Image (tube, rainbow, N blue to C red):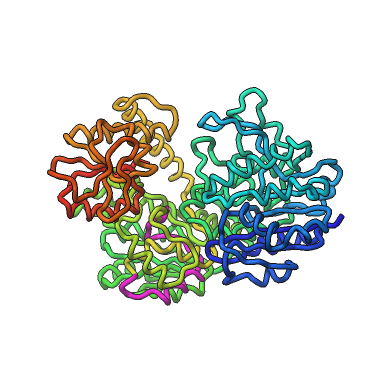
Amino acid sequence: MKRLGIYLVYDKDKIIDSYIDYMLGELKTCIDHLVVVCNMPEIIRGADILEKHADEIFFRENIGFDAGGFKTALCELVGWKKILQYEELLLINDSMFGPFCSMKDIFSRMDKKPVDFWGLTKHKEFIRQNKEFIAEHIQTFFLCIRFRMLQSISFQEYWEKLPYYKTFGEVVWGHETKFTSYFANMGYTYEVLADTRANDSKIKFENNFSQYALLSYELIKKRNFPFLKKQQIAYNTLAQQTQENLSQAIRYIDKNTDYDVNLIWENLIRTMHMADLQRSLHLQYIIPPTENTPKGKGSIAIVIFAEHREAAEYVLEYIDNLEAEFPVQIISENKEILEAYCSHARNKDGMSWKQRCDLASLGRYDLVCVLHDADVTSDVKPSYEGKACFYCIWENLLKDRSHILGIAEKFEQEEKLGFLAPPQPNFGNHFEELGLGWNEKYEEVKEIAVRLGLRCPVSEDYPPFRITDSFWIRGNILKCLNEIREEEEPYLPYLWIYLAQHMGYYSGIVESTDYASMNEVNMQYYLKHIIGQVKSEYGNFKSFDEMGAKLSSGVLKAFCKKHSRILIYGAGYYAQKYKSLLPEVEACIVSDGHKKADSFEGIPVRYLSEIRNPEECGVVLCLNRKNQKQVIPFLEQYGIKNYFCISQFE
């Protein structure tokens, strides 16, 4: 069988990762000629991977997404004359990890099926939210076209006429969902590798779904789908499920296949927001007590920064629970505080104390625990608050010897784990910190990240999942501190997760079993009361998303009642979405100098400068967060001080 393969790659950072090396190596065992199409003008790292495997490499702008890349390859770069010399054509993009079995086995299995084209998975027929019926279709990230269909005029005409779609959604609805039925209606037959019938409904089409996105573990383990799609990892599917499949899938791949999961981690850690990874993979570790010393337990250092004399009593209780195998350094610029520790532990093995510590110098240790004490007096706040914060940090990071051994064991088991933080205190006035986000520090942190050249995404929309100065960390990450300037040190609590990611590690939250059980009960208590209050004030709902919609609607209506004139800033997606929730809208407004239509869905569109008596107006900012921040100064410049930012409730 003479096969031609066209493999399409795209990476916003213009990097080719090692998972592609493995994929192309497997593909080359089954095809005669490999063409790689790069939907980017250049590759800045990893070009050698493509050169090792590809017979031809083409570069183009990312016009039309993967469908556009395949169209250009077929119709121009490779050309039909050459394509028709082959018996089979493969069209594959780089959106999946794998295969987790031999590619030869996949082709051997599919060679037994007498069909005209095949893929890996199919989506059963379903009904979109707009009531449009979508026929059963192969999902087009992997297509194999056989001789009869490949040689047909209809196949060439399909690609010649296919437009270069401008959005990903257009590719899905215009190409992927139509390709299968288009050729099936001409009499061409098809099949897929994965058997997903167990989850399909022939009765209620609206219940059919994209199974690789929601049941990846089941598909890999039971349904003959030896791949993991990258795209699903960024999805937030809590509206549909508990999101258990993804972490189960990666564990299964690691334990039950020969595939190196580090190929997955390399790409995810480089390309994904760590807040997304921590959420979607549940990187929250509850450490059971253990007396088992990890087989490869390396050197461990514990560093305690002491600022509060009265906290020494509580710090020393934790230190007394440790063995001399864990060296402890007490750091304080206050000599009286150091003396308090010295007098207690002068004869304790493994302890030392000094006025300053260069954390970068601790890079020689395998693992380092950094802790800060807390104000446990009642001089500023009642002492119970400071002691609760202290407990949250120390109970989860330094509970006792068995807890430390458990943490060391976790680092040994997960070689890509680089940083562990304690959970966020959520009692009393600390509850708001759960939603604090960047706390107005994004611009400064982003500037530092750019200066350091950190190889990871830093986005205003994805703040660190934990901001802390107490943590466990792999020692080699601390070497990054040599590049940190003194004036940048206050931003380190925001940077730790990104420094770890830059070094090729993911991060998580760590809890002791005792603390985790208490924290779970507390969070359930908060959640139940919030749900009860929202229902009481805004009406019933079933899902988290519905609750958010109720809150948005209720708070927005309350804002509108305060103002006699309502304006919408914006005339796009958000304006369309929220317009129906508002009372009579006087106008949509845009900044002076911007393009504008005369009206938006029957509402006049005006410039800011055209608004009279702005003090009477309430403006609803129907924009995303980034644009809201840019627009607010212009509103205030024109005397508009009453505005409502809708996306804060998104």
Q: Quadrant of the N terminus?
A: bottom right
Indicate whether residue 475 is drawn in magenta. Answer: yes
Choose between 40 and 351: the one closer to the eye. Answer: 40
Q: How many marks?
A: 0
Residue 60: x and y, percent? 60, 64
Left or right of 26: which side holds 529? Answer: left
Q: Does the rendering let one see residue 623?
A: yes
Choose between 397 and 473: the one closer to the eye. Answer: 473
Left or right of 583: which side holds 179? Answer: right
Residue 401: x and y, percent? 50, 57
Residue 233: x and y, percent? 56, 49
Choose between 212 and 39: the one closer to the eye. Answer: 39
Q: Which residues are magenta?
A: 464-488
Q: Is residue 525 above or below residue 376?
A: above
Q: Quadrant of the C terminus?
A: top left
Residue at 18%, 52% in the rendered image: 636
Residue at 43%, 39% in the rendered image: 520
Indicate whether residue 133 is drawn in magenta. Answer: no
Q: Is residue 228 above or below residue 487?
A: above
Residue 330: image quadrant is: bottom left
Residue 102: image quadrant is: bottom right
Residue 248: x and y, percent? 62, 45
Q: Is residue 491 above or below residue 223?
A: below
Q: Does the rendering let one see residue 431?
A: no
Q: Is residue 288 above or below residue 184?
A: below
Left or right of 255: which side holds 520? Answer: left
Most distant residue in the top direction = 203
Choose between 469 and 163: the one closer to the eye. Answer: 163
